[in-house]
Amino acid sequence: MTQDYEKTVAIEAAEKKKKEEERKRQQELDEKKRKEQEEIDRKNAEEAEQKRLAEIERKKQEEIERQQREEAERIAREEAERKAREEAERQRKLEEQRKIAEINSRTQGAFANSGSGSGGTGNSDGKSQGATFPGGNQGVPTGDPNATNYGDGGSGAGNQGTGAGISFDLGGRSAISLPKPEYPGNDAGIVVVKVIVDKNGRVTSAEPGVRGTTIANKAFWDEAKQAALKAKFNVDPDAAAFQQGTISYRFRLD
């Protein structure tokens, strides 16, 4: 009986040990699988993160390229517009020079001499007649220098030193006041201003640079316009409600 008991105890111990070893091996296997799975999950997470970052970088690069394309297109568009403006300005200047040359050709000799006299009506040896500042007749600079008759003009004598000769063409009207424009720079020539005058003799609008103008300098145009707007003519109830005419300013450097 004693011997059988000892064998039973030994067998139970051996089985218990075997079970414990199997349990530990199973735990080790489970731990190994767990770690392997964690490693797989980690690698999958890293790959997913790398893909996410790569997608972000791809979109960022696409946005940079898009902005670069837009900037290049903007620069090209602005350059084309700049060249177009320069070409338009060049053509405008060529046309302006052509018109000035044409005007100079038509009006050559029309203002060869300034008028003389003091107050009242003076005479001029030029081919046109009208009112010069501050006196004398010099004519209508926009008229035909070969014409046999003259347009309406004011009175006074030829100007002295640096200044502006003033004449006007407003059929049937006489000038009450023709203010002298400021002399804005070192230039000489004629600025013709188209004016609209009401029955009361007031200038309601003025447009400088019309036919007969020989100065391209816009500063002279502005001064001529301001002077024209201040001009006064006689009241004429029988005149048109808005009568059109011209005032011509001849700027000279003597």
Image (cartoon, rainbow, N blue to C red):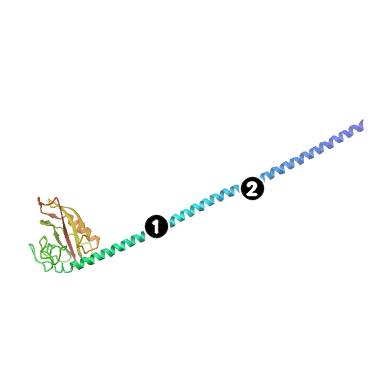
Asked which secondary structure carries label 1, the reply is helix
Point out residue 191 in the picture as x, y percentages from the top left corner. Answer: 20, 61
Residue located at (56% from left, 49% from top): 53
The CA distance from mark 2 to mark 1 is 50 Å
Could you tell me the amino acid type at mark 1?
Arg
Q: Point out which mark residue 43 bears.
A: 2
Mark 1 Cα-neighbour bin, 10 Å: few <14, some 14–19, many ≥20: few
Q: Point out which mark residue 225 bears.
A: none
Quarter the C terminus occupies: bottom left
**Disc 2 + disc 1, Cβ < 8 Å:** no
Residue 13 is at least partly visible in this image: yes
Residue 10 position by quadrant: top right
Quarter the N terminus occupies: top right
Point out residue 152 in the picture as x, y percentages from the top left corner. Answer: 11, 60
Most distant residue in the left direction: 120
| Residue at which label 1 appears | 77
Residue located at (81% from left, 38% from top): 18
Asked which secondary structure carries label 2, the reply is helix
Point out residue 174 in the picture as x, y percentages from the top left corner. Answer: 10, 57
Of residues 227 and 83, the one drawn nearer to the viewer in this rendering? 83
Residue located at (86% from left, 34% from top): 9
Residue 186 is at least partly visible in this image: no
Q: Relative to residue 244, is residue 25 depicted above or below?
A: above
Residue 78 position by quadrant: bottom left
Residue located at (46% from left, 54% from top): 67
Of residues 144 and 188, the one drawn nearer to the viewer in this rendering? 144
Could you tell me the amino acid type at mark 2?
Lys
The answer to whether 56 appears left or right of 128 in the picture is right
